Amino acid sequence: MNELNSVMLLECKGLTFRYPRRHSHVFKDLTCQISGPGFHALFGPSGVGKTTLAKIIASEITGFPGTAMTHDMGPILYSYNLERLPGWCSTGDHLAEVTPEVNQGKIHDLVRFFGLQECLNSRFAQLSLGQQNRINLTRYLLQDFNLLIMDESLANVDEATREQIILKIKDMFPTKSFLYISHNVMEVSKFCEEILVLRSPYKSPQAVCVIGQDYREGRSLKKRDLELTMLEVVHAT
Amino acid sequence: MLHRRIYQFLVVYFLGLVFLFLVKHLLHLSDYVVPSFRELWQTGHSVFARYLLAVLDTLAVAIVGHILSIFMATVVGIIGRLTTWLGSFIRVAAYNIQAYPIVAVAPIIFILLGDGLSSRLLITAMICYFPLLLSFLGILSEPVVPIEHFYVATKRTSWRLEVKIRAFESIGKLTTVIVGSATLAMVGTIVAEFIAADAGIGYSIRIALYQSDLAKILVALFLIGICTSLYLALLEWMGRLVQKKWEIPSGG
C-alpha cells in the first residue's frame, strides 16, 4: 500500500461537481486513481467531463466537495488544442522567449522531431491547424512540469505524425507524467499505460481504469492484446 | 483615403448649400436671411484667412484634448479591467457618468475656470473621453483565453502582457474607436468655444450668429469640414500603419 502511494499520480475521492446554474452534475461521488509517472489517458464520450476533470487536476477549477489529490507532484500544466500564440512575433521568437534557460537546448530537438523547422519564421496565424497544435504542444513540453495534461492537443495532426510525436514524448520524458485526452480508442489503447474511462454520472462507478499496451519504440505489440484492450475500453464506456 | 473623405465632405456641403438656396427660392426669403451665392463668395474671400487660423486653433485644441482623453481612457481602462472591487467600481462609475450630458456641465467649468484654453481643453477631453473609455473598458476587460491561458498556467502573466494581448487582438476596433472619437473631439471644442471662449472657430461662429451673418457661418462650416476631414484621414493613415506593422496574415 505504501509502495502504491509513493507512485500515486492522481487520486480523486468522492468528487462531486456541477457547473453554476446547471441542473445536472458532471461528477457525482467520483472516485478514481492513476499511478505514475508515464503516459496515461483520459477517455470517454463527449460531454462526460474529461476537460472538467483535467481542469480540476490542474487546479483551474476549485471549490467542490470531495478531493482531487496529486500527491505533491509539482507543476501541473493543462494544454488544449484551441490555444493560440500571440500574433505579434514569429513562433520561433515566441518559443525562445517562453522557454526557461535550462530547457533552451531542447528547442532544436523538439522542433525537428515535431517537423516544425519551416514554421519558426512564420506567425501563428499563418500555420495550418496541425502545425498550430504541434507548436503549442512544443512550448508546453519546454516548460518545467511534472504532469502535462494534453486535452486533444494533437487533434488536427495526421495519424502517422501523431504516433511519431507520442513515441518521441515517451522517449524524451520518461520521468514525467502525461494525461492524454483523446477520442481515438486505438491510440489510447496502444500508447497509454493506464486509461481512465469516464462514464455518465448516472453509471456506477463513474470511472473505470483500464491497463493499456504502453507501446514504445523497441517494444513489441501483439495485435490480439491491443484488440482486447480496445474492447475493454469500449466496453467500459 | 484623404481624397475620399474630402470628396464626400464636398458632396454633402454643396448638397446642403443647394438645399438652402432651394428653400430660399421657394419661400422667397431675403438675402438678409440666406445670403446670395455672390455674397457668400465675397464673405469667403474676406474672412478666409482669419477663419482658417481660427479653425486651426480649434483643431489644435481638439487634437490635444483627443490625445488627453485617449491617455485617460487607457489608464482608467487598464485599472477598470481588474476583477477587484476597484475595477468593478470604475466600470459602474464610467457607465453611469457617461449617461450624463457633458455639455450641460460645461457652464460650470467656465464659471470655475473662466474663458481660457483650460476650459476648452477640459470640455473637449470630457466629450470624447467617455465613448473612448467605454470601448477601452470593454476591450481591456475581456480576456483572450486561448492566448492568455498559457501565460497564466506557466505563471508568466502580468498586467502589461494582459493589456498587450487584449489591445493587439482588438487593434482594428481600437483604431475605429479612436478615429470615431476624433469627430467628437472637434465637436466638443466647438461647443466649448460656442458656449464661452475668446478664441477658435466656435467663438467666431458665436459672433457671426449675433450678427445674423449666415454667410460667415457657412464659410466657417466649410473650413471646419475640410480640417476635420484632414485630421480623420491622418488618424486613419496612422491606424493603417499600426495594423500593417502588426498584421496577422491568415494561412493554413
Image (cartoon, grey):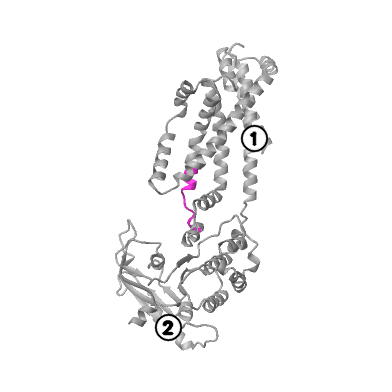
Q: Are marks 1 and 2 on the same chain?
A: no
x, y percentage for residue B207? 57, 15
Residue B173 location, quadrant: top right
Per the rendering, the mark at residue A229 is 2
* Mark 1 vs mark 2, CA separation in Å: 70 Å
Q: Give amino acid for label 1.
A: Arg
Query: How many numbered markers are drawn?
Result: 2
The disc numbered 1 marks a residue on which chain?
B
- The residue that appears at 60% across and 11% down in the rendered structure is B32
Q: Is residue A140 visible?
A: yes
Q: Majority secondary structure of the magenta segment? A: helix
Q: Is residue B252 visible?
A: no
x, y percentage for residue B202? 57, 22
Circle 2 residues within 10 Å: few <14, some 14–19, many ≥20: many
The disc numbered 2 marks a residue on which chain?
A
Per the rendering, the mark at residue B37 is none
Residue B111 included in the magenta stretch of the image: no
- Disc 2 secondary structure class: helix
Q: A106 or B27, which lies in front?
A: A106
x, y percentage for residue A232? 39, 82
Q: A78 or B76, which lies in front?
A: B76
Q: Compared to B195, does B238 lie above or below?
A: below
x, y percentage for residue A36? 42, 77
Q: Compared to B44, does A154 lie above or below?
A: below
Q: Give amino acid for label 2.
A: Thr
Which quadrant holds the N terminus of chain B?
top right
Badge 1 is on which residue?
B5
Circle 1 residues within 10 Å: few <14, some 14–19, many ≥20: some
Give, as a single range, the part of the protein colored magenta. Answer: B135-146
Q: Compared to A213, does B161 lie above or below?
A: above
- Left or right of A4 in this view: A78: right
